[in-house]
């Protein structure tokens, strides 16, 4: 009798573990950064990047219901030093925010790196493109870099967590299911 109870518990724990594992796989995000380009102008170091596969079906429903969504991009520039910790030169956080206006049936996109000006479009596809791209973001003035120095840019994107009033979380339960964070991407270069 004791042995049978032990086997049932063991089987129960295995099933519970498998359920949690499969559940996490089903909600896993495939969002990733692509087209990361590090270049320069005459005066500044610039970064271009794009996040792909960020708009899942549950996120689209939330946006169309009027819940604003914000992508945060984290870009850090390090000077790589051998046998010592890397030196942080620049640490930038920039955001892209989308909000749907139900009355006018239009999307308003604000991008902090672009001066925070509002871009309005009727097309959700166009709004997605505006949300997913960071173009010519100034990271640092070239005067702060050493010629021939080894540097590294680390970039990551995440969907900012939404804080709703207490009871709204019960009504809009799907909002908690569309959080994502990309992997940390690194690009090494010599200036």
Image (cartoon, rainbow, N blue to C red):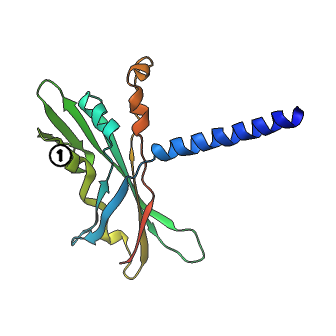
Q: Nearer the viewer, residue 101 or 125?
A: 125
> Residue 57: horizontal and vertical position, in percent?
31, 39
Residue drawn at x 29%, y 60% is: 49
Q: Residues within 10 Å of mark 1 (few under 14, many from 20)?
A: few
Is 142 on the left-hand or right-hand side of 76? left
Report whether residue 163 is seen.
no
Total numbered badges shown on the rendered structure: 1
> Residue 123: horizontal and vertical position, in percent?
13, 41
Residue drawn at x 57%, y 45% is: 21
Residue drawn at x 42%, y 48% is: 29
Q: Quadrant of the N terminus?
A: top right
Is 181 on the left-hand or right-hand side of 3? left
> Residue 146: horizontal and vertical position, in percent?
39, 77
Q: Nearer the viewer, residue 9 or 119?
A: 9
User: In this picture, is 169 found above or below 90?
Assistant: above
Q: Nearer the viewer, residue 30 or 86?
A: 30
Figure quadrant of residue 48: bottom left
Report whether residue 180 is seen.
yes
Residue drawn at x 32%, y 71% is: 143
Extreme residue in the right direction: 2
| SS label for mark 1 | helix
Q: Nearer the viewer, residue 83 or 99?
A: 99
Extreme residue in the top direction: 167
**Which residue is disc 1 drawn over?**
125
User: In this picture, is 1 found above or below 22?
Assistant: above
């Amino acid at each position: 009798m004791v042995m049978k109870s032990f086997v049932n518990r063991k089987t129960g724990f295995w099933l519970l573990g498998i359920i949690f594992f499969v559940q996490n796989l089903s909600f896993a995000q495939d969002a990733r950064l692509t087209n990361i380009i590090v270049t320069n102008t005459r005066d500044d170091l610039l970064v271009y990047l794009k996040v792909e596969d960020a708009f899942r079906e549950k996120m689209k429903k939330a946006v169309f219901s009027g819940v604003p969504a914000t992508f945060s991009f984290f870009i850090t520039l390090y000077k790589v030093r051998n046998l010592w910790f890397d030196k942080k030169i620049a640490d930038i956080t920039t955001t892209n925010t989308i909000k749907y206006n139900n009355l006018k049936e239009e999307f308003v996109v604000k991008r902090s790196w672009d001066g925070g000006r509002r871009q309005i479009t009727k097309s959700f596809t166009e709004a997605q493109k505006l949300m997913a791209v960071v173009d010519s973001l100034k990271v640092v003035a070239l005067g702060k870099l050493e010629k021939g120095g080894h540097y590294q840019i680390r970039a990551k994107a995440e969907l900012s967590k939404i804080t709703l009033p207490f009871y709204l979380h019960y009504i809009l339960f799907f909002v908690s299911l569309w959080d994502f964070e990309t992997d940390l991407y690194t690009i090494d270069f010599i200036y």
